[in-house]
Amino acid sequence: MISYLDTGAIVKFYISEIGSETVKEIFDLSDVLATSSIAYVETISTFTRINNEKKMSNSDYRNIISNFKRDWEDLFILKIDNTIIKTAGQFIESYKIKGYDSLHLASAVLLGQRINKIVNFCCWDKKLNEAASKENLSIFKNDLNP
């Protein structure tokens, strides 16, 4: 199974919140875990914001950042290229989604097209999941998609 993780799904692997158990199952069940290169910056930004808001200790922050950077090497990373950028622009117009969300969607859709296999899209954003479904991605069941 090939699973594409948006940033929110990646964060749920490291920080216990609604959906974390599902993400851990996805990590265990998937043969390949893919994401966009933008997820690196978005994920570190999220952890840093949470730490700055004093919602985690500095020690936990350092451990999470260290674990994330180590685990990043095991992910299949899709680099943002001109095809992804143009496709993302089309998705913004079609689905009225945010810029980085459109890059995640374009990355997942183009991954599926390039390998000619179904890609399971892991996300906790309802609007993005709806767009992914319209683009024929398989959506993991979660609290947004029971």
Image (tube, rainbow, N blue to C red):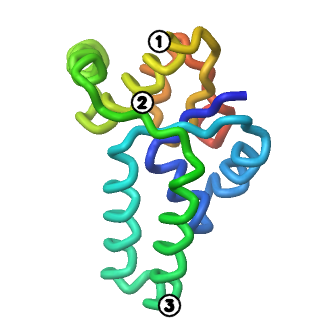
For the residue pair 18 and 105, the one nearer the viewer reads as 105
**Residue beneath disc 2:** 128
Tell me the distance, in whole angstroms, between the alpha carbons under discs 1 and 2: 11 Å
Q: Secondary structure at mark 1?
A: loop
**Residue beneath disc 3:** 59
Among numbered discs 2 and 3, the one appearing first in the sequence: 3
Tell me the distance, in whole angstroms, between the alpha carbons under discs 1 and 3: 41 Å
**Residue beneath disc 1:** 135
Left or right, 38 with reference to 60? left
Disc 3 residue type?
A: Ser
For the residue pair 55 and 38, the one nearer the viewer reads as 38
Disc 2 residue type?
A: Leu
Name above or below for residue 86 compared with residue 34: above
Rendering coords of residue 65 (x, y %): 46, 72
In which quadrant of the rendered view does residue 44 lie? bottom left
Q: Residue at x 38, y 86 (%)?
A: 54
**Mark 1 Cα-neighbour bin, 10 Å: few <14, some 14–19, many ≥20:** some
Q: Residue at x 42, y 20 (%)?
A: 131
